[in-house]
Structure formats: structure tokens, C-alpha cells
Image (cartoon, grey):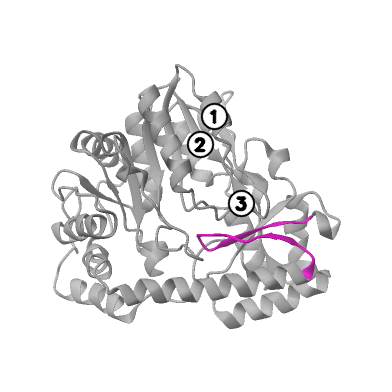
Amino acid sequence: MTRPLLNRRLAEFGTTIFAEMSALAARTGSINLGQGFPDTDGPEEIREAAVRALRDGRGNQYPPGPGVPELRSAIADHQRERYGLAYDPDTEVLVTAGATEAIAAALLALVEPGDEVIALEPYYDSYAACIAMAGGTRVPVTLRPHEGAYVLDLDELRAAVTDRTRLILLNTPHNPTGTVLTRAELTAVAELAAERDLLVVTDEVYEHLVFDGAEHLPIASLPGMRERTVTIGSSGKTFSFTGWKVGWITASPELTSAVRSAKQFLTYVSSGPFQYAIAEALRLPAAYFDGLRADLSAKRDLLSEGLAQAGFEVYRPAGTYFVTTDIRPLGATDGFDFCRSLPERAGVVAIPNAVFYDHREAGAPFVRFAFCKKTEVLEEAVSRLKRLA
């Protein structure tokens, strides 16, 4: 055949870096601190809830298109109790196959070919692919290191908006930098969205993983934003069942209907029995969520301190379960080369942040490590990484 087989919109996207690095970890027997998945399962009672649903015949056939009523009600209750956001579980909640499908469905539904989509760079790799599949043009606004953290330049954000801008794609708490956008920053984004009549799609899958008193504030809770915001949530990160792929959106009836129009032609439905289990998970007592944060905060500190001792410059995250580091103090400048050689040098796998950038040079010296692992695994990783010093 003379024509390329791959659609030109996806031609720039090959195998994800996560697949490459996870394969490298398996091949070399290295500790995988690259891909963000826990190495332990979530609460036993939630696993048993899934088993009970299977045995009771709930969800073994196609569940309802919007999601099972029990889960939609639990999601609505969660948003109301935690953030004061009232959503109708019948018209304003949609269950998806993880946050990844929610992102894809939202962008496919809301973006026309030629529309511009602003995304905070560095960004999760599916954002770029989904914008491309929708025929949109991505416009990165770069979070930049400043005094030990990554910050949003609001002037740069305002300057990025044009007459072709359709929506702003947010992610807070932010992967990979660990930034949690502040109330002042989100208020400025909200004012800009209202002024320029923009939609906002906000990925909040790490909403429960914030540390040191940081506040997760849904932008939908700010004045004028509920009707123009699609909020994306997920169970995988919060409950350590990433393989179940249970995500959701909450939005106005009009936006929910639009996203459902695209979602129904993606997976149609998914995760039947697991939906019932996640409905129970969302109703776990506050002690569960407090314990999760405390556990991950301690692991963040363990890995961050070990990375600093190994010679990295460490950007201490306020949220998520990733630590971004600068490799230049170790005499390196290319994150790809560094990560591909790290298994042989130290028996550890990480992810080069440059894959999350349009401006690859801006992310070249930064590398991401995941700390959602057992304490003993992180201790061994820290011990190995000290060889670099």
C-alpha cells in the first residue's frame, strides 16, 4: 500500500512510554517506579463487594448506559458532601471506563475540528492523543519550576486564548508535577473562562491525594462554573483498583448528554460488577481517606529524601503520587537517555517528563518517580538509587 496505514491525526503517537518502561523493568528485573499503579490492592471489603455483586448476578450483563443507579447516587452524594456541588444522579452523572474514556468522550463530544484546546504542560499523554482524535489543536501552557514547585503563569494562560479556543483542559492535583492549583489560580481560570465563554474539562482523579494541608478545590464549585465545567473523577487512584477502570463525569444535563453521545460509541458500558463495589467504596468513612493520605505522604517523604540523597533536585509534590526530579545535578541533561540507562545503573525504572511536553526541550532534564508502592519496595529503590551519588 502506498498510503500510510495510521490516521495522520495519530501519526505522532507511538507506543506509550509507560509500556516501554514497564517492559524494561520486567526485562531487567528493576523496581518499577515509572507507571503509576499501586503494588497492593485496595480495601478488602471493597474487593468482597465486587465478589458479592458477581455472585448475586449484578452487573454480569450490560449495566445501564449511564452507569448503575447505586454508583451514580454515590457519586452525586460524594460531590455534595465534600464540595457542596449538587448533581442529579439521573441527568448529571455518567459512569465511564476509567478517567481515560471520560477524557476521550468529553473531547470528542465538545471539540470541533480546528478548535483550540488549552492544556497545562506537562500533561498526561492521553490528552494530546484525544485532542488529536477530536481534530482539535492543542495549545500548551507550561507549568514552570519555581522555588521547589511548579507554578501556573496566569498571564501566559490569558495570552494563549484566541477566538478559536473552545475549552481549557485542567488537571489538579496535577500529574506529573504534583502541583495543586490554588483557589486564587482557579478563580483566575474561572474568570477567564466566563469572560471568553470557554468550557472547562477538569481531570480531578487525584482529588483525595493532597498533602501538607493543600486544598483540592473543584473549579465547578466557583461562581459561574458549574454550567460550563465537565468534572472527571475516578476510583482507581483513590481505592487502588486501577484495573477495574471505573471513572465518571459530573456536569450539567446538557454537557452530560453531549459526553454520553460520544461515550456510547466507545465502550458503550463497562465494569458492571465493579460499579456496585465502587458505590460502596465512595461511602467509606473519612478515616479511610485520611489514612490513605497519611500513608502516601509518608511514602512521598521517604522517596523524596532518598532521591535528594542520591543527588537529584527534588520538587516535593503537594498532591498525586509522583515526584518530579531534575537530573542536572547528576551531570545528565537528557531524561530519555537517563531513564533508559537507569535500570542498568541502579535497578530502578522512572519516566522521562519530556514525553508530557510539546516543548520537549522544556522537559528534557526532568524525570518522574512514582511512590504508590510498598514501603519496603521504596526503601530498596532508595538504597539502589544511592549508587548514583
Asked if residue 320 lies in the magenta stretch, the reply is: yes
Q: Tell me the quadrant of the picture where the C terminus can be found.
A: bottom right
Disc assigned to residue 119: 2
- Residue 331 occupies which quadrant of the picture? bottom right
Callout in the foreground (1, 3):
1
> Outermost residue toward the right?
331
Of pointers 1 and 3, the one earlier in the residue sequence: 3
The reply, left or right, for residue 282 in relation to residue 134 is left
Residue 356 versus residue 243 in the image, above or below: above
Q: Looking at the picture, which amino acid does disc 3 mark?
A: Ile
Residues tagged 1 and 3 counted as in contact (Cβ below 8 A): no
* 294 is higher (above) or lower (below) than 257: below
- Inter-mark Cα distance, 3 to 2: 20 Å
Q: In the rendering, at what x and y percent does residue 333 appear?
A: 81, 49
Query: Could you say where residue 201 lies in the image, as x and y percent from the top left?
Result: 38, 39
Q: CA distance from mark 1 to mark 3?
A: 22 Å
**Magenta segment, which residues?**
310-327
The secondary structure type at the circle numbered 2 is: strand
Q: How many marks?
A: 3
Q: Which residue is mark 1?
A: 139
What residue sits right under mark 3 in the picture?
17
